[in-house]
């Protein structure tokens, strides 16, 4: 591997000091003269038609400036090209509605001089609602006489829930529900999606062991640290909006669309964002509320979202009700996976995480055949969306305990059975033809390294010993997920001050790719990091067109883009040097802020001087000529910077064969108390295959942070509804129970395989998501292992709360296995 | 009119510097006044706009309510002493470790720094229906949402429920019950000292309240007699999340042994009824018995007699039984049979 000066080395990221000292300004910190604060009126019931709104009393109050209703919002009907529903969280969903489809959906907003007044004004508004039928549990909607969550039907069949052809009606038979009553998903019931690869029937037939089980995987609310607060004002026909989003430049289009303006009319500022985890990829419809209230009142407006409202509008991971058949050969090889998954995407549109769940299984376990059948049932629960590794924790919650169970039945080691089934770099995956090739996969390497760090064999002996009422168990799991996109732009500027300015259009929301991928440009220009400035945080910073900041793609996409751009800048430096000092451009090398003759026959040019010369030369050197292939956004940014120095600008056009996928192996030990059902994760190790390691300390944070999210999915996080009226009863952090730092082992271990991905010239793959699944699966399998020591079965419902452990230890029957509200 | 569960409405704030001044305010404002100690129970009631006092009396500036002092052979703990201070106090740790443990198990380090012992005893129900502002029995309405065919009642009562299915959420209460603690309640008209056990009320007595504190009264101190100092103690709290969570069931025990024979034992649990319960029948069954698995099991069976689980909380019966069993037997020694 190449010896790097920056890649693979720790450093302090440039925004860190502002964050830890509190100097960093988040949207909510912004204040302006004459500003207003707004509050939302949320639907008190899960489905209704708004018949009448009377806000006269509120508007008559001192200090109340305006209300905003759905009539004030621009019409949004057709999805614009290039925007994916994954990123937007809804085509038809708008900031405010006349037909609330879930409890907590915003109906209108009030702007007032302060929040106390705005909240009082909300209480003075009369809203007449006509209640409509609602559904909390997807299975209720499939009952022969069950209610539909949408007036148009109960299942999503198209990818865009925009008209009746995307929402249809599907009912199961009374006979199907006899199976449900027995705690099994009816295998022969109708599905809306079916796709397969290979012959699943034959695969199951040739298996030595077939497991066939019904699972429930819960939905979990996001609750990111910073709520989705937005501050907006208008000036000279332009909207200035401070937002909390994952993506920066990629949020501009959606925000403009929701506000009803052209992207060029938006000045977007997003320097610091307090986490998104998939819930803020390209912003969200509610940004339109302060923007349009500001337009209406001609005053700056702040919208702060409460914790409770975050529960409703802040997105959730969709839950599953599923049945899985899995065939194994005597040696543990998976012959076939047959899956039937009901997903609850909420009321707005299909989220397709059920299919993703099957797809990641096809990748992690390489079954010889796989079939996926699914239904996306409209429910009147808060809208679901991406949550760090969307589909992956749900997938491992079903497949990993089955693999553990099979290993026990077949007398195989848990690590070995995963190695037998693991993909390698020449593997393919998918649940639809054509299968996708992998760019690289070092899963066996990760499993071997993890087993070594975790002392798997030694621990296996140790945990078999009992102490008092406590048993121990160990578990291992594999997580895989998408880890990179291609084709984005980079933009570099060397100014006459001799510094390298690295412009970044991706967001700064905690994952730090915005800083780390900038190091790639510096690395290949031999530029000392202290002479580099990362430029990020808003449209006014003139940034290049970038990937979405989500889906673990930025480290991959922008290491490539910044590498391409570094090569462009280097070439220009070589050309300028050749023009000044003679010889061919190839005779020159760059390092340490200088371009110099490779043969050391004298002559060197400081970057500062090269920048001055670039301005004199003009054309492509100082940004007056722009390569055709870069995006229009990049072109506009280059134009704005033109004449300030030497500009490097390029699009990532490096080839890539295959789909970039990241992997992680997780190893957990739990101690389970047989008298209380309480268990603790006592140790955890994760090893990731993320290609070349870019920033070790940040990678460790990503792996362990993602692992804690995985722990939470298995151990405590949950949403509970009252079925009678469809209202959420778990409304507070202490009720939805994300794990805290005191819920995780004091010491956790991580490592990376650190083998470069051959399809990225810099070798880097994404990091953020596979560790979530590896951790969820490892803890789940460790619990299963502990239960197996007292001859008990695996638990088929997450989260694994102590009441479910006690049930498993007692009758073995999980109370209400399939109920989606408990 | 629309509902909003956000922004604390305006109120008049008083920050008296003496108990006398505080009592004067309570007398003057009566039902309109809200007593604020650590705020951990108060603030979400206020922010949810469900409780809307005109006046808030903040006890934070009253020095005489803070601190732990020796009184005779026992201890007196000021009601607004922080839970952290209770958990760390050397005398509490040495002589009444069951209380130190209970305090240490409350919520999270941050909440223990802010939350007070008096507040932990006096906090309101955490029933999610009641806390959501639903018009249930406890809120003055005429039904219990938890006790309905669709009620989500995993965290609710298995004992003594009558109408309302609330449980008492305090961790320190069962510890104080087994220590025979007394509570000092003061009003402008005088002082009354009651047994800790008598402070708490179930729905049969009053479905609107979890304790017998009157609107013009303040809980000023908690007195711990020397009776159980240095006894064998046990405390355990079972919760879903190991930090910042309320007890599903907790148990406290104080025991004096002669060899392996139980001379005296006091047992209490919380999280199973609207008030913390002293388990006198189980205690009586253990008197003079050997401290064995069998005796523990028998006492635990007695303790859960009469339990009436709801649809989702049957596990609490198992949990309570097993916790009592090991409070008597000790945590580490067990045989488990499926």
Image: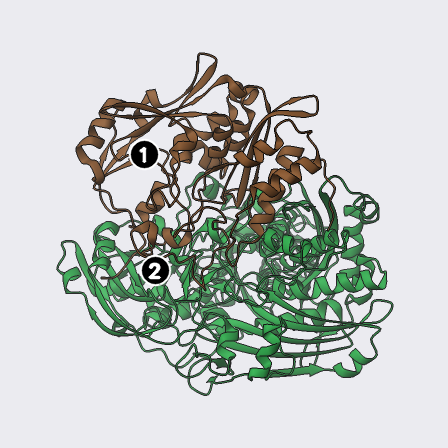
Task: Say which element carries label 1.
Answer: loop
Identify the residue at horizontal 55%, vertical 36% (top origin): B281
Q: Is residue A141 left or right of residue A342?
A: left
Q: Quadrant of residue A660?
A: bottom right
Which is more foreground, mark 2 or mark 1?
1
Which chain is drawn using brown? B
Chain identity of mark 1: B
Spot occupied by residue B28 in the image (x, y as percentages of width and height): 17, 32
User: What is the crowding at mark 2: few (fewer than 14 residues within 10 Å), some, or many (at least 20)?
Assistant: many
Q: Say above or below: A344 vs B244.
A: below
Residue underneath mark 1: B213
Q: Is residue A455 left or right of residue A316?
A: right
User: What is the crowding at mark 1: few (fewer than 14 residues within 10 Å), some, or many (at least 20)?
Assistant: some
Which disc, if any, is residue A241? 2
Q: Is residue A446 left or right of residue A149?
A: right
Near-viewer residue (A542 or B80): B80
Quadrant where the image shows the N terminus of chain B: bottom left
Q: CA distance from mark 2 to mark 1?
A: 51 Å
Residue A195 seen anywhere in this rendered image of the structure: yes
Near-viewer residue (A232 or A372): A372
Spot occupied by residue B189 in the image (x, y as percentages of width and height): 22, 24
Chain A colour in the picture: green
């Amino acid at each position: 591997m190449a010896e790097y000066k920056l890649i693979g080395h720790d450093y302090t990221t440039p925004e860190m000091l502002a964050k830890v000292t509190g100097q960093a300004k988040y949207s909510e910190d912004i204040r302006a003269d004459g500003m207003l604060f707004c509050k939302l009126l949320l639907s008190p019931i899960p489905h209704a038609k708004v018949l009448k709104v009377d806000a006269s009393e509120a508007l008559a109050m001192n200090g109340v400036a305006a209300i905003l209703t759905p009539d004030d919002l621009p019409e949004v009907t057709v999805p614009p090209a290039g925007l994916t529903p994954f990123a937007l969280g809804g085509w038809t969903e708008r900031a405010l509605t006349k037909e609330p489809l879930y409890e907590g959906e915003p109906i209108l907003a009030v702007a007032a001089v302060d929040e106390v007044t705005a909240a009082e004004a909300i209480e003075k508004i009369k809203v007449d609602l006509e209640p409509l039928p609602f559904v909390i549990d997807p299975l209720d909607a499939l009952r022969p006489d069950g209610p539909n969550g949408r007036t148009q039907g109960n299942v999503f069949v198209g990818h865009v829930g925009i008209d009746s052809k995307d929402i249809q009606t599907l009912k199961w038979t009374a006979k199907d529900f006899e199976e449900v009553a027995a705690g099994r998903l009816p295998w022969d019931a109708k599905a809306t999606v079916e796709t397969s690869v290979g012959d699943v029937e034959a695969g199951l037939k040739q298996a030595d062991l077939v497991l066939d089980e019904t699972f429930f995987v819960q939905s979990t609310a996001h609750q990111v640290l910073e709520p989705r607060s937005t501050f907006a004002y208008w000036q000279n026909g332009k909207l200035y909006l401070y937002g909390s989003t994952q993506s920066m430049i990629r949020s501009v289009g959606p925000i403009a669309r929701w506000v009803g303006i052209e992207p060029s009319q938006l000045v977007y500022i997003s320097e610091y964002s307090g986490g998104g985890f998939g819930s803020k990829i390209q912003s969200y419809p509610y940004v339109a509320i302060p923007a349009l209230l500001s337009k209406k009142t001609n005053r700056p407006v702040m919208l702060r979202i409460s914790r409770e409202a975050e529960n409703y509008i802040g997105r959730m991971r969709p839950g599953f009700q599923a049945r899985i058949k899995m065939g194994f050969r005597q040696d543990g090889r998976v012959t076939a996976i047959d899956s039937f998954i009901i997903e609850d995407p909420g009321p707005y549109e299909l989220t397709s995480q059920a299919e993703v769940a099957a797809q990641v299984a096809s990748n992690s376990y390489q079954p010889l055949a796989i079939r996926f059948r699914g239904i996306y049932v409209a429910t009147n629960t808060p809208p679901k969306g991406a949550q760090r590794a969307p589909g992956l924790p749900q997938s491992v919650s079903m497949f990993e305990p089955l693999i553990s169970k099979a290993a026990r039945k077949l007398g195989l080691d848990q690590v070995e059975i995963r190695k037998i089934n693991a993909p390698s770099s020449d593997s393919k995956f998918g649940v639809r033809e054509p299968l996708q090739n992998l760019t690289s996969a070092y899963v066996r390497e990760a499993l071997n390294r993890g087993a070594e760090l975790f002392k798997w064999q030694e621990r296996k002996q140790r945990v078999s010993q009992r102490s008092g009422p406590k048993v121990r168990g160990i578990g291992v799991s594999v997580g895989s997920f998408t880890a990179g996109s291609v084709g984005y732009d980079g933009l570099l500027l060397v100014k006459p001050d001799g510094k390298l300015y690295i412009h970044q259009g991706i967001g700064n929301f905690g994952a730090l790719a915005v800083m780390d991928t900038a190091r790639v440009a510096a690395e290949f220009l031999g530029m000392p990091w202290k002479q580099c400035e990362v430029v990020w945080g808003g449209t006014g910073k003139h940034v290049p067109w970038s990937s979405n900041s989500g889906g673990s793609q930025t480290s991959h996409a922008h290491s490539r883009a910044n590498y391409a751009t570094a090569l462009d800048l280097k070439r220009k430096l070589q050309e300028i040097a050749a023009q000044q000092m003679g010889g061919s451009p190839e005779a020159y090398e760059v390092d340490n802020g200088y371009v110099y003759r490779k043969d050391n026959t004298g002559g060197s040019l400081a970057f500062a001087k090269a920048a001055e010369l670039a301005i004199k030369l003009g054309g492509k050197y100082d940004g007056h000529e722009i390569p055709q292939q870069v995006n229009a956004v990049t072109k506009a940014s280059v134009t704005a910077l033109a004449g300030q120095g030497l500009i490097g600008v390029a699009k990532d056009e490096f080839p890539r064969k295959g789909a970039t996928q990241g992997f992680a192996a997780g190893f957990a030990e739990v101690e389970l108390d047989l008298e209380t059902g309480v268990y603790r994760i006592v140790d955890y190790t994760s090893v990731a295959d993320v290609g070349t390691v870019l920033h070790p300390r940040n990678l460790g944070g990503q792996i362990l942070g993602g692992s804690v999210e995985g722990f939470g999915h298995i151990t405590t996080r949950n949403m509970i509804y009252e079925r009678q009226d469809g209202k959420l009863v778990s409304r507070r952090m202490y009720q939805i129970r994300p794990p805290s730092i005191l819920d995780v082992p004091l010491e956790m271990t991580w490592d990376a395989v650190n083998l470069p991905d051959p399809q990225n010239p810099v070798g880097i793959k994404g990091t953020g998501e596979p560790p979530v699944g590896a951790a969820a699966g490892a803890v789940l399998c460790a619990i299963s292992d502990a239960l197996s020591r007292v001859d008990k079965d695996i638990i088929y419902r997450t989260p694994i709360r102590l009441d479910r452990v006690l049930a498993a230890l007692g009758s073995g029957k999980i109370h209400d296995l399939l109920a989606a509200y408990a | 009119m629309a509902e909003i569960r956000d922004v604390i409405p305006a109120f008049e704030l008083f920050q008296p510097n003496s108990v006398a001044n505080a009592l004067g305010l309570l007398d003057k404002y009566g039902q309109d006044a809200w007593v604020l100690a650590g705020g951990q129970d108060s603030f979400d009631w206020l922010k949810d706009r469900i409780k809307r006092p005109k006046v808030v009396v903040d006890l934070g500036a009253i020095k005489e309510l803070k601190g732990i002092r020796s009184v005779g052979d026992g201890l007196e703990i000021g009601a607004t002493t922080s839970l952290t201070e209770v958990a760390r106090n050397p005398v509490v740790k040495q002589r009444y470790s069951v209380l130190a443990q209970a305090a240490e198990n409350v919520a999270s380090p941050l909440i223990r720094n802010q939350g007070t012992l008096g507040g932990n005893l006096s906090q309101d129900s955490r029933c999610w229906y009641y806390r959501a502002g639903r018009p249930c029995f406890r809120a003055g309405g005429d039904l219990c949402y938890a006790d309905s065919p669709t009620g989500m009642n995993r965290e609710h009562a298995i004992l003594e429920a009558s109408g309302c299915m609330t449980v008492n959420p305090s961790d320190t209460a069962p510890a104080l019950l087994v220590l025979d603690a007394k509570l000092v309640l003061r009003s402008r008209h005088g002082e009354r000292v009651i047994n800790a056990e008598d402070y708490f009320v179930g729905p049969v007595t009053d479905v609107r309240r979890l304790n017998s504190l009157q609107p013009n009264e303040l809980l000023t101190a908690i007195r711990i007699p020397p009776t159980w100092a240095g006894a064998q103690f046990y405390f355990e709290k079972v919760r879903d999340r190991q930090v910042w969570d309320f007890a599903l069931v907790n148990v406290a025990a104080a025991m004096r042994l002669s060899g392996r024979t139980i001379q005296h034992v006091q047992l209490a649990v919380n999280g199973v009824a609207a008030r913390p319960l002293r388990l006198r029948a189980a205690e009586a069954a253990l008197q003079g018995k050997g401290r064995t698995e069998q005796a523990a099991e028998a006492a635990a069976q007695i303790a859960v007699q009469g339990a009436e689980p709801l649809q989702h909380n049957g596990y609490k019966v198992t949990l309570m039984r097993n916790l009592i069993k090991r409070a008597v037997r000790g945590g580490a020694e067990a045989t488990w049979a499926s």
